[in-house]
Image: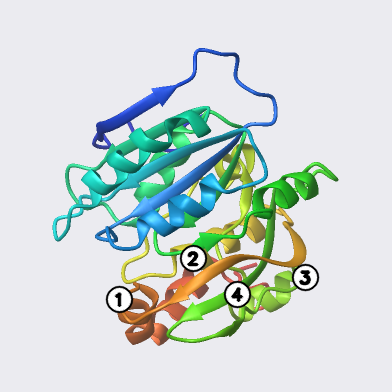
Amino acid sequence: MSVLKPWDPVPDIAFLHKKKTRKPKNLVSVCVTNFNYAALIGDCLDSIARQTHRDLEIVVVDDCSGKDASVQVITDWMAENRARFYSLKCLVNRRNQGPSFARNMAFEHALSDVVFIIDADNMAYPTALEKLYAALQEGPFPAVYPQLEEFGGRQGVGSADLWDATRMRRNNYVDVMALIRKTAWETVGGFSHIERGWEDYDFWLKFIDHGLEPAYLPEILCRYRVHDQSRTATDALAAHYDLELVMEFRHPSADNAEP
């Protein structure tokens, strides 16, 4: 099932490679969203290439980067590393659509039933996908998320913890760097565009709305870059209180829901 609409714009294909072998049963698709991160995306892609989980696909969606040579950097990297992966795709939006559309596009083109989300300015430790994939197979979990390490403008450990719907309704403590089943993404209707940010929070709140409970793997497996150019540090921080109202309207708590 597709969450994209028939009238949604189709991206250009800047790079496409797939091995002429049967799709591996343990294939994991990695969704990388990029917007003007030519200087950083190489580190992100290198971290995926170093994964101990061998059967991988990368789907990069460039959201119409116009300030740097992102697409050239991505396609050069894919050409150099094509032997490592079962499949590589670089899709380029013809106009900027925002992170939600870019992620939905990546899910739409992913060949695997499980998709790992990572933004182009972040990285994953080598055993991240192997451990997340193993955890996802342990039960009927819709998704599994790890603990994060913060680096860059701030050093420390992230705020991830056991899934608690009540706590999540108060504030988001789970990043979108997670291994997610495509069926769960379809069930919640994918990512929704939220003006000025908090698409990730909205996505997890939709899990609560649909009675889905992700699993927490309490190990530092991914690296989250803290810097002043991220959308979280710009639009979302300035609009914090407005976005709280948007989340309450879109996902009313039990106390405020109409009878």
As measured in the structure, the alpha-carbon distance from the residue carrying label 4 to the one carrying label 1 is: 18 Å
Position of residue 82 measured from the top left corner of the image (x, y, whole percent): 43, 31
**First in sequence: mark 1 vs mark 3:** 3
Residue at the spot x=64%, y=79% of the render? 159
Residue at the spot x=63%, y=37% of the render? 183
As measured in the structure, the alpha-carbon distance from the residue carrying label 1 to the one carrying label 2 is: 27 Å
Q: Which residue is mark 3?
A: 162
Position of residue 130 measured from the top left corner of the image (x, y, whole percent): 71, 47
Q: Secondary structure at mark 3?
A: loop
User: Depth-wise, is mark 3 or mark 4 nearer the camera?
Assistant: 4
User: Depth-wise, is mark 1 or mark 2 nearer the camera?
Assistant: 1
Mark 3–mark 2 contact, CB under 8 Å? no
Q: Secondary structure at mark 2?
A: helix
Q: Which residue is mark 1?
A: 229
Residue at the spot x=32%, y=71% of the render? 196
What crowding class fits label 4: few (fewer than 14 Cα within 10 Å), some (14-19), or many (20 or more)? many
User: Depth-wise, is mark 3 or mark 2 nearer the camera?
Assistant: 3
Mark 1–mark 2 contact, CB under 8 Å? no
Seen as rendered, the residue at the extreme right is 138
As measured in the structure, the alpha-carbon distance from the residue carrying label 3 to the one carrying label 4 is: 17 Å
Q: Which residue is mark 4?
A: 149
As measured in the structure, the alpha-carbon distance from the residue carrying label 3 to the one carrying label 2 is: 24 Å
As measured in the structure, the alpha-carbon distance from the residue carrying label 4 to the one carrying label 2 is: 30 Å
Position of residue 242 measured from the top left corner of the image (x, y, whole percent): 38, 82
Q: Which residue is mark 2?
A: 250
227 relative to 13 in the view: left or right: right
What crowding class fits label 1: few (fewer than 14 Cα within 10 Å), some (14-19), or many (20 or more)? few
Q: Decide: is 208 above or below 60.
A: below
Residue in the foreground of this view, choosing between 26 and 242: 26
Residue 149: image quadrant is bottom right
